[in-house]
Image (tube, rainbow, N blue to C red):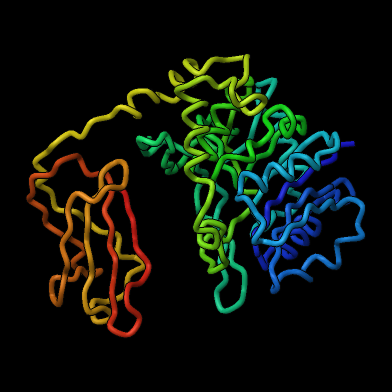
Amino acid sequence: MDQIFIQIASYRDVELPLTIRSALDAAKYPERLTFGICWQYDERTFLDLDEFVNNPRIKISQTYYENSRGCCWARNQTNLLYDGERYTLQIDAHTRFAQNWDERYIAMLNSIDSNKPIISTYPAPFEYIEGVEFKQKKHGMQRLILNRVLRNLTTVFKSEIVEDTSKPAPSKFIAAGQIFAHGNFCQEVEYDPEHYYSGEEIALSARAYTHGYDAYCPNEDLIWHLYKHSMPTHDADHHQNQHPQAIDRLHDLFIGDHTNLGKYGLGSIRTLADFEEYTEINFANALNRQPIPCHFKQTVQLDMSTIKSRKAYDYMIFSLKDINGKELYRVDLYGDDIPTVEAPYIDIHEELEDQPVTYMLWPHTQNEGYLKQFHEVL
């Protein structure tokens, strides 16, 4: 039977029961679905799974959120609940499903000419508008591409539109919020519980590739993700997190001796050099990168789509940052100098100690203080 093992790591997420119901309601064969859930609950959500706890097809590893060790640890907990199902789907706890998604994922995976295919990309977005769910249907099919590699060997990804949607398109990287593969992927490339979110996808991509897996982005949207939400996150709750330890493990994986990581190291089907050639990444060069001074003369066009009119702010900070997020240039903008939708430009003419790759806008109001920062690639 074509069972699908659905893996969900949920952290204080009120959307979790809605996600489970969406998967069941939209499936063509709901009786073939099993779930492995790492439920990191709090006082607000501790009753949310009452309707599912006696369902034998829904396995739950539960822990109070203060005892959580982060997203990769939680995904490892879901891996451990795998019980031989033919397929697996990894998603986040705030996801919605297309009709007959189960049959369509299987057909899509089986259409790929690979012994070890993976379907993965950032899911299309859905949002609530006046309490009603709206799925973005004109998102376009997108795959992950590399934005930059930081000196600590974590990576920043972005996405690009794939024009040919007649079949799944090859992809160099895996997105953690949507992974559909044969079920033994859970055991062969088991999540490293000591990683943290900032190194999650590059580590998983390299480990899957060296185990012989080939990643593809889907050629149709089968799930949607709630990107705009105010739910709590692990890194905000746990100020003393695993990030330094996770960075050490990335160094072992990409620069040192990956066999120190045991089953969480690289595979033996392909080499790290093969992965670097395929992805055009040189981890040693990234680790040893030196600043490149530049004369930066440019009119920066800003994305003002989510920023209010200048009357809403008493000032705004604009800065340029290097590949590692270090601030290279800053200016505080007041009054008529604050950019608007009609005039979304800032002219820069400066000597900088390194090449900037991103800019930041940080609005401030007299009543609320500093608001959300907006980061964009130059």
Task: Report the front residue among 319 and 376.
Answer: 319
Residue 343 in sight from this viewpoint: yes
Give residue 186's position: percent from left, percent from top.
73, 34
How many numbered discs sit on the rendered protein? 0
Given the current orientation, which residue lies at the most extreme front position? 240
Residue found at x 37% / y 23%: 284
Give residue 271's position: percent from left, percent from top.
54, 15
* Quadrant (top left/top right/bottom left/bottom right) for the N terminus: top right
Q: Quadrant of residue 268?
A: top right
Given the current orientation, which residue lies at the most extreme bottom position? 367
Give residue 310's position: percent from left, percent from top.
23, 76
Q: Is residue 294 left or right of residue 88?
A: left
Task: Report the front residue among 229 and 319.
Answer: 319
Residue found at x 14% / y 53%: 299
Give residue 139's position: percent from left, percent from top.
50, 53
Residue found at x 64% / y 61%: 66
Q: Is residue 250 left or right of residue 71?
A: left
Q: Quadrant of residue 231?
A: bottom right
Residue 143 in sight from this viewpoint: no
Query: Looking at the image, is 204 positioned above or below residue 128?
Result: above
Query: Looking at the image, is 265 positioned above or below residue 10?
Result: above
Query: Looking at the image, is 375 positioned above or below residue 315?
Result: above
Residue found at x 62% / y 20%: 267
Q: Is residue 234 left or right of residue 188?
A: left
